[in-house]
Image: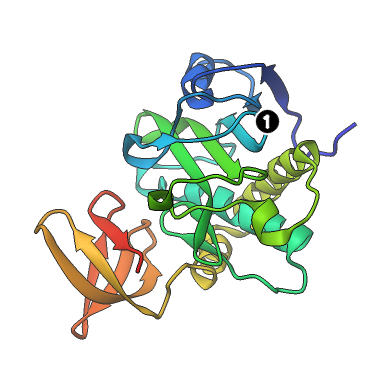
Amino acid sequence: MKKFIWPINLIVLKKINSTNQYAKKYINNKCNWIIIWTMNQTKGIGMNKNLWHTEKRKNLTFSIVFKPIKTLYVKKIYIINLVISNAIHKTLSKCYNQNNKEKIWVKWPNDIIINNKKIGGILIENSIFSKQIHTTIVGIGLNVYQKQFQKKWNASSLKEIFNLNLDLDSLFYKIIYSFQKEYLLFTIYGEKLIRDYYINHLYLKDKTSIFYIHKTNHYISGTIRSITDQGFLVIESNKKLYFFYHKEIEFLIL
């Protein structure tokens, strides 16, 4: 029997185009912690509707249908993103990187980065009712055993980085438990604890980087300083602070 803080309802599929798309049929289900898991996702969707490419039986691809236990208003919609990002970061750090040999980061808003390579991504879709989050679908893709990636993806996998034999089942359940634990911490201690951890492990924080600003169609040189209490990225450029939502800015990885 797996250990969880709240019971889960697990649905395992042999093959599906997208676990997030499949999970939407459960938005109005009264059950919480419904998890859709497949070893063969054929058309996974990432941020900005980009395809998430994954090889059969080599990675983790699953979605969690989650109903906030604590009232969560739209203006705090970013909290779930922080909670699951922290949960994955803590799981990987504790299980595979105890000696801190590799640098594990969270790339704003929700990519997992190790040694400057993307090894995982999160797609969050929310159902909103009366300015509150009614249901959230958290889609997670984690590269575990995959070895072949297109250069433009700037991606890698846990196997390539840590050179360990990884148990997909074990890693899956550890992430679920870590998500529940991180959410429990939020309900008890509030968002500051969650936000502080996220900021402390923010990729490229306090380092000069290049960003593309969609609104002005320009590149700027700036330094990530923090995120606000509504999830906006804070970038310092020419001694001024600028605030960006995730669709307004793009990182240029050199």
Q: Nearer the viewer, residue 125 or 160?
A: 160
Q: Estimate how packed mark 1 is, as few (under 14), some (14 to 19) or many (20 or more) residues with alpha carbons within 10 Å.
A: some
Residue 29, above or below 83? above
* Left or right: 59 as drawn, with respect to 203: right
| Quadrant (top left, top right, bottom left, bottom right) of the N terminus | top right
- Secondary structure beneath label 1: loop
* Left or right: 46 as drawn, with respect to 208: right
The amino acid type, in three-letter code, at marker 1 is Arg
Tell me the residue at 25%/66% (across/down). 211
Residue 251, quarter of the rendered image:
bottom left
Residue 128, above or below 174? above
Q: Position of residue 5 (x, y in %)?
A: 77, 40
| Quadrant (top left, top right, bottom left, bottom right) of the C terminus | bottom left
Is residue 37 at least partly visible in the picture?
yes
**Residue on which the image places disc 1:** 57
Q: Position of residue 97 (x, y in %)?
A: 73, 66
Q: Nearer the viewer, residue 90 or 68?
A: 90
